Amino acid sequence: MSTTPTTESPFHYLEDGLAQLKRDGLYRRLRELGGAQLPLARFDGRDVINLSSNNYLGLTTHPKLKEAAIDAVKRLGVGSGSVRTIAGTLELHMELERRIAAFKKTEASVVFQSGFAANAGTVASLLGKGDLIISDELNHASIIDGARLSRAEIRVFPHRDVEGLERILDETRDVKRRLVITDGVFSMDGDIAPMREIVALARKHGAIMMVDDAHASGVLGRAGRGSVDHFELHGLVDVQVGTLSKAIGVLGGYVCGSRTLIEFLYHRARPFLFSTSHPPAVAAACLAAFDVLEQEPERIERLWANTRRFKEGLKRLGFDTGLSETPITPVIVGDAELAMRFSDRAFERGVFAQGIGFPTVAKGKARLRTIVTATHTEADLDRALTILGDAGRELGVIR
Ligand SMILES: *Cc1c(COP(=O)(O)O)cnc(C)c1O
């Protein structure tokens, strides 16, 4: 038998997959940010109006956050050195968890390395074989992955469809443990979950209620407390997830709820147990961000004023912005290849609005995803509208 080493790559199927993405217009290069994440930023060497970050309040570069991070590095170094459950729980982590719980008005909170880890780790540890997870069809990938890892059964209800949810709850009365889960604000459409109705149904049926507020925290509710505060549902939502990576401007995720829930997650959430905790600078910068949220409410006001101005402008130009009610405003194009061309054309003219296609959104629903921030000026937004309008007309997206 020949033992000649083969030079044949085992990755032909990956090459084929990439070629298919190119044919479908879904292949993309990563744009490189040179410099800071700002409303006017330099991507791929070009100065553009940045409508693609989740930096809602401009906190990624806030002087108080930077100062807190630098001070933490000087005092405590750059790494935590361990997982939370062994030697990696810093006093700063505990302070941050107390701070978040107070902010969200819950008994306790636990911080994870990312929002993804918070969702996946929590869903997978709360539910198991024989249980049922009932999930909105547009919920975030981290919820879907957590649901799969849990080995519970999964039922999906149509997007924001309260009657569809009720039907599933009625049909599954005999299942002992059920979780109803929804995003508070949907990350690609910018619409808001009908939380009052969903929470009422979950409670009526004795199901656990969980909300992922990644895009609602820092945006909705008093001082950005999220969808539970926005809809005045304090005490009625069992599990609230948030992220520290979006409006908070740093990195991480958290879960808020009862002391019992949090203690259970300390013992069972696998990303908490098996992955190293945040470095001191991250925890310190997050703490400073919660100070800023309370001290500078005008940031949230500016975010919403900018949101209204930009949305009205897009509608006036004739763009389809879907059902968005928040700073996330999709410009729906339909065809993926056209969406990518539109995004590229706008970029060449000075606007960065990422084109998004399948699998992040459904086939035929490709779009540019725009997010304005508190730190864009009106002039920035008006200029972006002019550029998007011109590019949209040239490509036939609008007339
Ligand atoms: C971004 C996002 C997450 C993940 O948060 P990260 O902190 O970036 O890991 C979770 N859920 C939703 C709805 C998101 O949009």
Image (cartoon, helix red, strand yellow):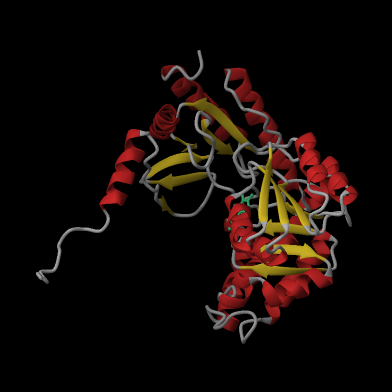
Q: How far across and how far down the image is residue 219, in percent?
A: 72, 47
Name which quarter of the figure residue 350 lies in: top left
Name which quarter of the figure residue 130 lies in: bottom right
Q: Residue 276 or 376: which is nearer the viewer? A: 276
Residue displayed at 75% across by 73% down: 264
| Camera sees residue 115 | no
Q: How far across and how far down the image is residue 225, in percent?
A: 79, 53
Q: How far across and how far down the image is residue 232, in percent?
A: 88, 47
Residue displayed at 77% across by 59% down: 239
Q: How far across and how far down the image is residue 237, in percent?
A: 83, 55
Q: Residue 340 or 208: which is nearer the viewer? A: 208
Relative to 19, 378 lies left or right: right
Q: Vertical placement of 263 versus 370: above or below? A: below
Relative to 18, 129 lies left or right: right
Q: Quadrant of the N terminus?
A: bottom left
Residue displayed at 17% across by 58% down: 8
| Camera sees residue 128 | yes
